[in-house]
């Protein structure tokens, strides 16, 4: 696939940093004033939505609209306007959250309020009007737990209503199977990959980004090997068309639309980095020595950063810590 030039501007990078660490809301609102939500038809029922560094996806069909991730809260009105432009008056039935971060769930309250869940049969009378006036929100249970810790807290109407703790959750919507695969201990401990089986599109969340080195949130249950496992899962699901191009499309958590070859290249890089750092750890090298050895130098031009919230040093440190075997309690070195 062609590269559309994915270098972020400083302002955009600052916006992501805000979203990750949750800064002042007023400042964030100002930052998104110039950001527009754009949409691209990927294939089948699925559209990719992009606004600066933020990605989301929608499935639009006879049953209504399913939204995967909802960007940051200050963009929610623009996100809803773009969905309405694409889907007309079709109701928003479901939201799926790929994980708990505010740049993926921030718009949940507004999108959920704008939606309507499917309530039928005997159940309808019990549930009443109130609950059917919002979209169902699917997420892994660990994502629900982490969303409960967000600061500032997310409005209750934006919290997941339908969680699961198994490896997989399937629903059938708009004439196709929609499968959510939990990827344990990857970017966080609650990541799901969403696979639209008939449309042949995967929404990866932050286990696959093509703008930076992988973001491994060790403090939130993430691990570097888990990210590599998730990338291998995506590669297992994707099938390329001729000359390794197109076929199954992959919408990353951040960055441009990708296909299998893009994910393979990214997985290969991370596998090589894993082996280099593992080797350095086995030789007894300290974190400082590994940083100084610049083991990811050949990839820094494309994915590295010296400033911002996820620098090359942050990445190398996360990889080093993630691959260092845990010492038995009481043993020091
Ligand atoms: Zn994230």
Image (tube, rainbow, N blue to C red):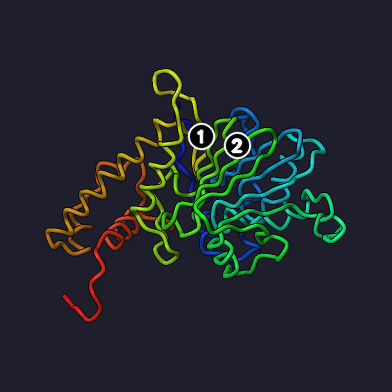
Say which element carries label 2: strand
Q: Relative to 180, is 288 on the left or the right?
A: left
Query: Considering only order in the chain, which callout, 2 or 1, is on the residue closer to the N terminus?
Result: 2
Is 289 drawn above or below residue 269 in the view shown? below
Q: Residue at x 39, y 30 (%)?
A: 261
Answer few, some or many: residues within 10 Å of disc 2's Cα (few below 14, many 20 plus, some between 14 and 19).
many
Q: Which residue is mark 2?
A: 48
Q: Residue extending furthest left?
A: 283
User: Is 172 in front, or is 193?
Assistant: 172
Q: Which residue is mark 1?
A: 257
Q: Is mark 1 within 8 Å of ligand 1?
A: no
- Which x, y percent locates residue 56? 60, 44
Q: Residue at x 46, y 58 (%)?
A: 188
Which quadrant would the C terminus be assigned to in this image?
bottom left
Q: Relative to 60, is 167 on the left or the right?
A: left
Label 1 and label 2: CA atoms lie apart by 8 Å
Answer few, some or many: residues within 10 Å of disc 1's Cα (few below 14, many 20 plus, some between 14 and 19).
many
Q: Is mark 2 within 8 Å of ligand 1?
A: no
Marking on residue 324? none
Which quadrant would the N terminus be assigned to in this image?
top left
Count of marks overlaid on the render? 2
User: Is 288 in front, or is 224?
Assistant: 224
Is 61 drawn above or below residue 246 in the view shown? below
Say which element carries label 1: loop
User: Is 46 in front, or is 286?
Assistant: 46
User: Is 200 in front, or is 246?
Assistant: 200
- Which x, y percent locates residue 332? 18, 78
Is 154 drawn above or below residue 191 in the view shown? below
Q: Residue at x 55, y 39 (%)?
A: 195
- Is label 1 in contact with label 2 (beta carbons under 8 Å)? yes
- Which x, y percent locates residue 104? 58, 53
């Amino acid at each position: 696939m062609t590269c559309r030039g994915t270098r972020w501007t400083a302002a955009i990078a600052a916006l992501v940093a805000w979203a990750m660490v949750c800064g002042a809301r007023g400042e964030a609102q100002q930052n998104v004033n110039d950001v527009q939500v754009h949409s691209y038809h990927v294939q089948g029922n699925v559209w990719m939505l992009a606004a600066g560094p933020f990605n989301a996806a929608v499935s639009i069909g006879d049953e209504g609209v399913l939204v995967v991730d909802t960007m940051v809260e200050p963009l929610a009105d623009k996100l809803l306007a773009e969905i309405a432009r694409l889907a007309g008056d079709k109701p928003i039935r479901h939201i799926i959250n790929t994980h708990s971060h505010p740049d993926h769930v921030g718009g949940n309250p507004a999108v959920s309020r704008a939606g309507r869940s499917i309530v039928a049969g005997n159940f309808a009378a019990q549930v009443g009007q109130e609950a059917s006036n919002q979209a169902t929100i699917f997420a892994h249970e660990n994502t629900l737990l982490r969303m409960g810790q967000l600061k500032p807290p997310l409005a209750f109407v934006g919290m997941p209503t339908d969680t699961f703790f198994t490896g997989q959750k399937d629903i059938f919507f708009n004439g196709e199977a929609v499968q959510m695969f939990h990827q344990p201990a990857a970017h966080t401990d609650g990541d799901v990959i969403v696979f639209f089986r008939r449309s042949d599109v995967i929404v990866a969340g932050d286990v696959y980004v093509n703008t930076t080195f992988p973001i491994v949130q060790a403090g939130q249950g993430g691990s570097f090997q888990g990210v590599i496992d998730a990338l291998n899962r995506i590669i297992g699901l994707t099938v390329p068309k001729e000359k390794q191009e197109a076929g199954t499309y992959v919408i990353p958590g951040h960055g441009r639309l990708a296909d299998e070859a893009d994910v393979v290249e990214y997985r290969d890089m991370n596998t090589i980095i894993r082996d280099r750092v593992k080797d350095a750890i086995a030789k007894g090298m300290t974190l400082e020595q590994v940083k100084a050895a610049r083991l990811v130098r050949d990839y820094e031009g494309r994915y590295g950063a010296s400033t911002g919230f996820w620098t090359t040093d942050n990445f190398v440190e996360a990889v080093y810590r993630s691959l260092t075997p845990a010492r038995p309690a009481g043993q020091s070195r």
